[in-house]
Image (cartoon, grey):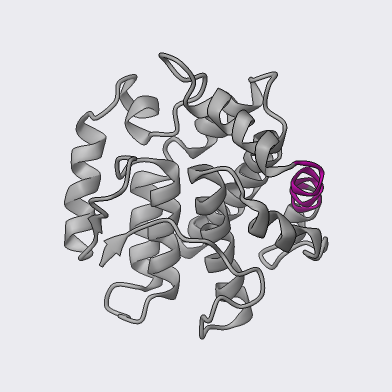
Amino acid sequence: MSMTAQSIDLATDGLQADSEELARAELYGLLSRLWLAPPDAALLQQFAHAVTQAPERGALLEAPWQALVHALRQTTPEAATAEHQALFHGVGKPEVFAYGSYYLTGFLNERPLAALRTDLAALGLARDTAALETEDHIAYLFEVMRYLIAGDDVGISNLEQQRRFYRSHLQPWGHQLCDAVLAQPRAEVWRAVAVFTAAFLAIETQGFDLLET
C-alpha cells in the first residue's frame, strides 16, 4: 500500500464499520488532511454545512470541534494558504516543524524516522514517491492510523496494531507539536486544528490506557 494523506468525506467515507470506529477513522483522516496542506474551497464548503455536535469518542471533543468548525467557516482558501505557509514553510527555518524526529531528537531525519520506516515496512506500507514530506510528518502518521482502523486486512488493521503504532510513533510527541502551534501568534486556523488534535489524542491515549489495564 502506498501511504498518502487523503481528503476526508465528512459523511461516511465508504467505511464499513461501527459508528465509533467510523468516527475515529474519519477524524484521523480529517486531521491528516488539515496538517498536510491548507483546506481548499471544496473542504471549506463541506465545513460550511458540517454539524457542530461533538463527534463520537466523547464529550471532551465538543468544544474543540465547534471551534474548529468555526475557524474553517471564517477562513478562505487564500487566508488558510498564507497561514499554513507562514507556520510550516516560510523562508529558511519554519516556525513549526511537523515531524516526529524533530521533537524526539531535535533534528530532522534521525533514528526515529528509520525506526518508523522499519515498522511501516512490516505493515506493508511505503511512502508515496510523489510525496514531499517524510514519513514522520504528522499527516502521514494520522493516515497510517486511519488505515489501521479502516483497512480490509484484519491481520494488519486491528486494535493491537493501532495500539503499538500509536504508542511508538504518535503519543511520544504529538502534544509537543500542538503546543508549538499554540505558541505562534500567527496561528488562527491551525490554533483550532491544534486544540482539536490535542483533545483527540488525549482521548486516544486514554482509550489505549484502558485497553492495557
Question: Is residue 160 found left or right of 71 in the rendered image?
Answer: left
Q: Position of residue 2 (x, y in %)?
A: 27, 62
At 28% across and 50% down in the image, what residue appears?
130
Percent position of residue 186, x then y: 68, 21
Question: What percent of the width, then of the height, locates residue 37?
Answer: 52, 44
The quarter of the image holding the N terminus is bottom left
Q: What secondary structure do most residues of the magenta stretch adopt?
A: helix
Depth check: give the residue in front, 129 or 104: 129
Q: Quadrant of residue 149?
A: bottom left
* Residue 148 magenta-highlighted: no
> Is residue 205 positioned above or below 192 on the image?
below
Instruction: Name which residue lies at 44% across and 33% down.
Output: 98
Q: Indicate the position of residue 19 as horizontal and vertical percent values.
A: 63, 79
Q: Is residue 20 left or right of residue 123?
A: right
Q: Is residue 204 left or right of residue 50?
A: left
Q: Furthest-top residue in view?
A: 92
> Residue lying farthest bottom?
16
Magenta stretch bounds: 64-75
Q: Is residue 205 visible?
A: no
Is 51 left, or right, of 132 in this rendering? right
Front residue of 62/10: it is 10
Q: Is residue 177 above or below residue 183?
A: below
Front-most of residues 42 and 94: 42
Q: Is residue 153 above or below residue 61?
A: below
Q: Is 68 part of what is drawn in magenta?
A: yes
Q: Residue at the location (77% across, 64% down)?
A: 50
Residue 21 shows in the view: yes
Residue at coordinates 64% horizontally, 20% vertically from top-left?
184
Number of numbered discs present?
Answer: 0
